[in-house]
Image (cartoon, grey):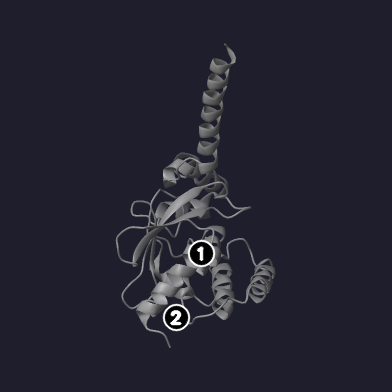
């Protein structure tokens, strides 16, 4: 079994080799920011967040701390600090190392959703418990899965019965249409790419430089054309 420091280094390297943008906060390997896009077919689609991750000394035996830097409206995320509910993280975190069985995970979640369809719309607790149970069966925790599985599931299936944002939880249970609209308003106001610190596309800047070069070349050619 690898030491916590080796596992931390290995998991971070795996994350940095993916398409996620990772920015280290200090010289160490325990605090960093990750650019996270809202999952498709969700209220958060199109939003971009900077997510702060802090790895404890006991990682992976202790789960990482996760927080949204720019604001997000969600029952299980503290609106002021951006922290994700530790109970939710710990329910799905395991120090086991390996690849998640994605086909089994997908099948389990589908079965869970099918079962929940048999309950009333008020059965949020049952819905969440089934989802967590399905994830626990096939979830082998590492940093990549935090962003590919845990956070997307958190945004897709909020749990208002165990809130960090009591206002969001109450609104979700009282008036779902108004809640949905509030989520979208927060995305439009606080989750634009610039809000997450995303700089302009490198390709666009390259194209601008190329146009300048073309303009400069044209001027030189025009100047040489006259005898």
Q: Residue 106, relative to residue 20: is it above or below?
A: below
Question: Tag 2, which secondary structure?
Answer: loop
Image quarter for residue 66? bottom left
Outermost residue toward the front in this view: 227
Which residue sits furthest top?
227
Of 140 and 206, nearer the camera is 206
Residue at the bottom extreme of this rendering: 1
**Which residue, given by chain and number where applicable, does mark 2 sit on?**
95
Q: In this view, does 81 lie to the left or right of 160?
A: left
Residue in view at x 58 percent, y 78 percent: 138
Structural distance between the alpha carbons of marks 2 and 1: 21 Å
Quadrant including the C terminus: top right
Q: Which one is in front, 43 or 16?
A: 16
Q: Which mark is residue 101?
A: none
Residue at (34%, 51%) from the top-left corner?
80
User: Which image quadrant is residue 132 in?
Assistant: bottom right
Task: Give the residue pinned by disc 1.
Answer: 17
**Crowd rating for badge 2 (residues with CA inside 10 Å; few <14, some 14–19, many 20+):** some
Provide residue 166's location: percent of width, then percent of height.
Answer: 40, 56
Going from N to C along the chain, the mark reached first, 2 or 1, is 1
């Amino acid at each position: 079994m690898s030491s916590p420091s080796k596992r931390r280094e290995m998991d971070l390297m795996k994350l940095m080799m993916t398409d996620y943008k990772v920015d280290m906060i200090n010289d160490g390997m325990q605090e960093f920011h990750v650019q996270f896009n809202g999952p498709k077919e969700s209220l958060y689609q199109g939003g971009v967040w900077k997510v702060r991750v802090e790895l404890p000394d006991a990682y992976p035996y202790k789960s990482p701390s996760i927080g949204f830097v720019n604001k997000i409206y969600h029952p299980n995320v503290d609106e002021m600090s951006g922290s994700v509910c530790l109970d939710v993280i710990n329910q799905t975190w395991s120090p086991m190392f390996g690849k998640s069985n994605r086909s089994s995970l997908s099948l389990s979640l589908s079965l869970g959703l099918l079962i929940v369809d048999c309950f009333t719309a008020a059965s949020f607790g049952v819905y969440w418990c089934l989802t967590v149970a399905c994830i626990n069966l096939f979830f082998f925790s590492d940093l990549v899965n935090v962003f590919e599985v845990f956070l997307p599931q958190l945004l897709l299936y909020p749990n208002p019965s165990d809130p960090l944002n009591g206002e969001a939880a109450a609104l979700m249970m009282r008036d779902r249409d108004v809640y949905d609209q509030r989520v979208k308003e927060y995305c439009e106001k606080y989750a634009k790419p610039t809000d997450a610190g995303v700089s302009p596309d490198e390709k666009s800047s390259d194209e601008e430089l190329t146009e300048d070069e073309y303009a400069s070349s044209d001027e030189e050619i025009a100047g040489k054309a006259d005898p």
